[in-house]
Image: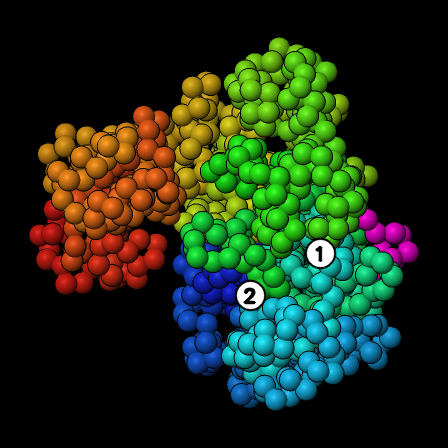
Amino acid sequence: MPKRKDIKKILIIGSGPIVIGQACEFDYSGTQAVKALKEEGYQVILVNSNPATVMTDPSMADRTYIEPLTVESVSQILARERPDAILPTLGGQTALNIATALADAGILDRFGVESIGANIDVIKKAEKRELFKQAMEEIGLETPKSEIAGNLQKAREVIESIGLPVIIRPSFTLGGQGGSVAHTMEEAMRAVEIGLENSPIHQVLIEESIEGWKEFEYEVMRDKNDNAVIICCIENIDPMGIHTGDSVTVTPPMTLSDRQNQFMRDASIAILRKIGVETGGSNVQFALNPKTGRIVAIEMNPRVSRSSALASKATGFPIAKIAAKLAVGYTLDEIPNDITKKTPASFEPAIDYVAVKFPRFAFEKFPGIPRILGTQMKSVGEVMALGRTFLQAVFKGLRALEYSTHWLENLRNLSTEEIIEYIGQKSPDRVPYIIEALRRGIDKYRVSKLTLIDPWFIEMFGKASEMIDLLEKNPLDEETLRSAKLIGFSDLDIGIISGLGEEEVRKLRKKYEIKPVFKIVDTCAAEFEAFTPYFYSSYDLEDETFVSSGEKVLILGSGPNRIGQGIEFDYCCVQAAFQLRDMGYESIMVNSNPETVSTDYDTSDRLYFEPVTFEDVMNIVEKEKPVGVIVQFGGQTPLNIARRLEKNGVRILGTSPESIHRAESREEFAKLVDQLNLRQAKNGTARSIDEAVTIARKIGYPVLVRPSYVLGGARMAILYDEAKLIYYLKEHTRVSDENPLLIDEFLEDAFEYDIDAVSDGKRVVIGGVMQHIEEAGVHSGDSACALPPVKSKPEWISEM
């Protein structure tokens, strides 16, 4: 069918600020939708309150409103713009809730605005737990025993009827907010109270607990002619009871029988038909009892989600773009696949590799929070890793997470009892602990029973533990090194296990000519030629890349979202790719974050879905031979490897590693300020506890302590006496010659300013001066700010 001609102007509702459960995947989906609709000639209006997004860049939509995402503000935009339709399925739960509220208030009808992508009845049927349950019963699908409660008395009656344990799920919330598993009546009533408070309609679903079951997600698309495709099935390695956003996941599924897979495929399409999703994508979730084979439908999201972004990047199938085109009347068979240019969107993706997702947590930022996972999402970001085998993808994912302490070093000091206790709880980042438990001889059956993880995965982790033993007990000859690389170990992993160090392992690898090849993500398992492919590395035989003759520039992305390094760096990387293309360079992006616009297949000329580590980046540099590498747009991650890259002959474009070091090293920066004869707080650099105490006494308390090369103020602290300083030095940092600590006089009751500038080496242009509203001592990322500054004397601004 042709696109709709009765629609001229479409309002897209964004997802607002980054929160746990709703991050930059909606910038990716919104950006794809804006481009797709403009490509079809529609006028696109966007409303979003997040300035750090690619979608709010002035070059994207025809008109952009940076406004709060509330019913009141969106109503005013509708009155002013008079769009023909709104598209609420690409802005997460926020957009769905606003669209529903606008419809319930009669505002959409008043302005004659149609909800496309999913109509309001569809949203309600999918989001309201009792309507979803009723719909499943009508098509013969089981759901967990459950009932809705709107008050505490009703909740108690339902819990007594179902029996403990139970899962509490608030209606219309994001990332499982307010949800939990309760094993006692006291826990359950407390959870119900929280759930009622979190639900915008003050309802909770109380359902039988299916903790420990296996969880599967299907990404499905359907058009108005009832064509439907399964984009992929994602298997959760962690069991039910851990939110899917916090679970390690894999596609294709590893432990499903063909019969089970076909049943859930058919059920997914039946669910979309019953709920009424006619023009777009949905995420459908199932639980499978590993003992009995019983399958129940858990829920479905009638919108793109974080899993949709993962499925898009894992398969190369642009779900958000196609969802936008379906929303304006196209059918799947009419939309071409951009990567192959031969197959239509009705052609299901086929993959000949394994994709693994690891969640990224930030518990270190909140020391008092228990490191236990549950039905409420706690991860702040994620990485995706691609490999020819499951273990290759697993180890690539582990290094892409970029935790400051290497997991092998982290576990060596733990007792076996501590390891067992950790894996027996629903703890974050369990995979390294499981491998270590197996290496220490703990029985595989026991590990599977403790973790409730399928025995197949435990068997795979056992192969990794066997390789660790081999590396520890034998000389690193060519055969052993090649075997370790085939499994997926990095040079750093092998260097730590063997005791040789990363650099020596790298030299041996070069000596034995053990090099990675690069494989294509093309949506069709090489059945058709790929025109806009992206790549991943593997220690395999055949290389599938093609060499181009143009001048190339490598851009290093920022890796997983975390507190202090998020979507704003992706914005910078994307703008760099666009500008390089305009200047005639071939732009090459390196990143491991599946939620981002930078890892979209058409943002750069080439994409390498790889961890941003020294080893992985050097492999790409040696393959592509770019004229240079840009490190300054990806946050702290690329900066940390800039000097090593330069030392190994890589040309760093833009800010030099020497200048980066001068800014990142607290000691060097303090020297620079002195050389420029500028004022700064009294300070000193300590390389031992005794030296730190002496410097602090000389400066006087309170003092601000700051390590170098950290992200988001990590391990910075304001200390008011010597006892607190000594405690900090012993418990929170390692001060040494390699890790010096800058100690500053802390200026109380001071204003703090941020000044953004750009320089070509000769001229400096000030982009803006922002004044923090909170006093100095609150991190700039956590402080509200005003631009232009207020209550600031012109001479202060001029001097700064």
Q: Residue at x 55, y 68 (%)?
A: 177
Per the model, the C-alpha gap separating discs 2 and 1 is 28 Å
Q: Name which residue lies at 59% across and 76% down.
A: 186
Which one is closest to the eye, mark 2 or mark 1?
Answer: 1
Is 259 magenta? The answer is: yes
* Side of 412 where 137 appears, left or right: right
Task: Determine if residue 45 is in view.
Answer: yes
Q: Secondary structure at mark 1?
A: loop
Q: Is residue 445 left or right of residue 494?
A: right
With 358 as the anchor, is 18 left or right in this view? left
* 2 or 1: tag closer to the N-terminus: 2
Specify the farthest residue to the top: 511
The quarter of the displayed image where residue 444 is located: top right
Q: Quadrant of the N terminus?
A: bottom right
Farthest-out residue, right: 259
**Residue 626's spot in the image, x, y percent?**
51, 25
Q: Position of residue 142 (x, y in %)?
A: 82, 72
Where 311 falls versus 735 (above or below)? below
In this view, 332 is above or below 505: below
- Start and end of the magenta stretch? 255-265
Crowding at mark 1 (Cα within 10 Å: few <14, some 14-19, many 20+): many
Picture layout, residue 492 above or below residue 286: above
Residue appearing at x 62%, y 64% in the figure? 375
Q: At label 2, which amino acid type do we have? A: Gly
| Along the line of sight, the residue nearer the viewer: 330 or 481 | 481
- The amino acid at mark 1 is Pro
Q: Position of residue 68 (x, y in %)?
A: 42, 71
Q: Main secondary structure of the magenta part?
A: helix
For residue 575, which quarter of the picture? top left
Judging by the rendered image, the residue that carries numbered circle 1 is 239
Asked whether residue 770 is drawn in magenta, I would say no
The residue wearing badge 2 is 91
